[in-house]
Amino acid sequence: MFFKTFTSLFRGPPRLPIEPANLLKDLGKVETFPTLSDTTIRALELIHDPSSALAEVSDLVRRDAVLAVSLLKMANSIAYRGKHEIDDVRQAAVRLGKRGCLRVITSLGLKTVFRHRVAEARTACESLHRHALFTASLAAHLNILGDFGYQGEEFTAGLLHDIGRVIICVRVPEAFFRADPMSFREDATVLSQEREVLNIDHCEVGYRFAQANGLPDSVAATILNHHFPRAEEHHRDLVALVNLADALANHVQRERKLAGFKLEACPAYKILKKRLPPDVIDRFPAAVSGAVIKALRETRAMLHISAL
């Protein structure tokens, strides 16, 4: 305590919040946002189209050598590998399934958004990338566990829920580190701290990104309200699902273990619980640990292929 008090005497004068006009000059223009490739946009369309078939996904992959190699690597990873190694893209697509293929395509398509040339910002963006992949994978497995019926949009929403943090980090890195300690402790003060420093929060910035790129309403709503699912009117269950996945990911990344996570105290779970039949409610808490393990394996595999 004494050391903290003593060293604080040598700190410089407090820095004032960024002027809204200066920040929005960078963040408020569509042309300053990262853009998504045509392949990524098409993958997102297929995810949200229940009638789309695996053959359409295979066609998308065959047009891109990097995607083809990545799909093969994912299919042969520890998360998916069967008895035999696969060396054919079509077989890889069958093994992964439509959702698995689209996860790979979307994850790779968003990789460039998480890149930055400045070392300090690059480290933060890499950490946010890991968190995004982990949250997305958790959302996908929790969707299956609770039989919520989402067809891939939960993965996309999880992958993009913190995109506003990435954009702030890339555009105004010095201010980002003042506003965001990257501690994976996302309590009620997180957004107020951002607004104090930036005069805007990452949810609003991410929502503008979603609108600029024409992302589905459900994804945009999740980005905007993922800290407060009760505030969402039209896609509350999806927002709650991603909020729960985010809370789990934060806890595991912060504590390096699942023990200590209080599922019943999580507001998002209280929302989702209303959708669950009694038999699922009984097994859901115990099954969460299995979902976390599977999500960790998938995240490692996706990080491996994205490093190509």
Image (tube, rainbow, N blue to C red):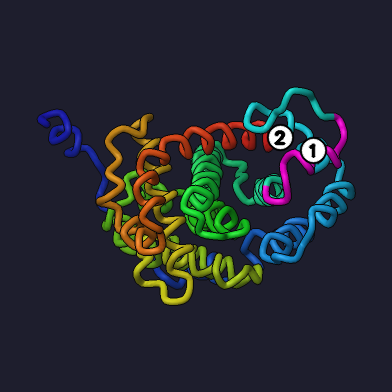
Mark 2: amino acid: Met
Residue tagged 1: 92
Q: Which residue is farthest bottom?
A: 233
The vertical placement of 165 against 80, above or below, is below
Q: Quadrant of the C terminus?
A: top right
Q: Relative to the observer, which residue lies in front, 162 or 87?
A: 87
Tell us which disc is closer to us: 2 or 1: 1
Foreground of the two, 141 or 179: 141
Q: CA distance from mark 2 to mark 1?
A: 8 Å
Residue at image point 35% right, 63% down: 274
Residue 307 x %, y %: 68, 33
Location of residue 179 in the rendering, given as x and y in whole percent from the top left corner: 36, 53
Identify the secondary structure beneath mark 2. helix
**Residue 159 position in % (x across, y down):** 56, 52
Q: Amino acid at mark 1?
A: Ala
Q: Examine the rendering and report whether any part of residue 112 can be seen.
A: no
Is residue 23 shown left or right of residue 34? left
Q: Secondary structure at mark 1?
A: helix
Check if residue 11 falls in the magenta segment: no
Task: Specify the quadrant of the image occupied by residue 248.
Answer: top left
Instruction: Classify 81 as above or below 244.
Output: above
Q: Residue furthest front?
A: 279
Can residue 33 be spotted in the picture? yes
What residue appears at the point 55 percent right and 60 percent down from the top-left corner?
149
Give the residue displayed 83% in from the left and 48% down from the top.
61
Q: Residue furthest left?
A: 2
Residue with the mark numbered 2: 74
**Labelled pair 2, 1 in contact (Cβ < 8 Å):** yes
* First to last magenta residue range: 87-99
Please indicate whether residue 152 sits to the left or right of residue 127 in the image.
Answer: right
Could you tell me which residue is drawn at 10 percent across and 30 percent down?
Answer: 2
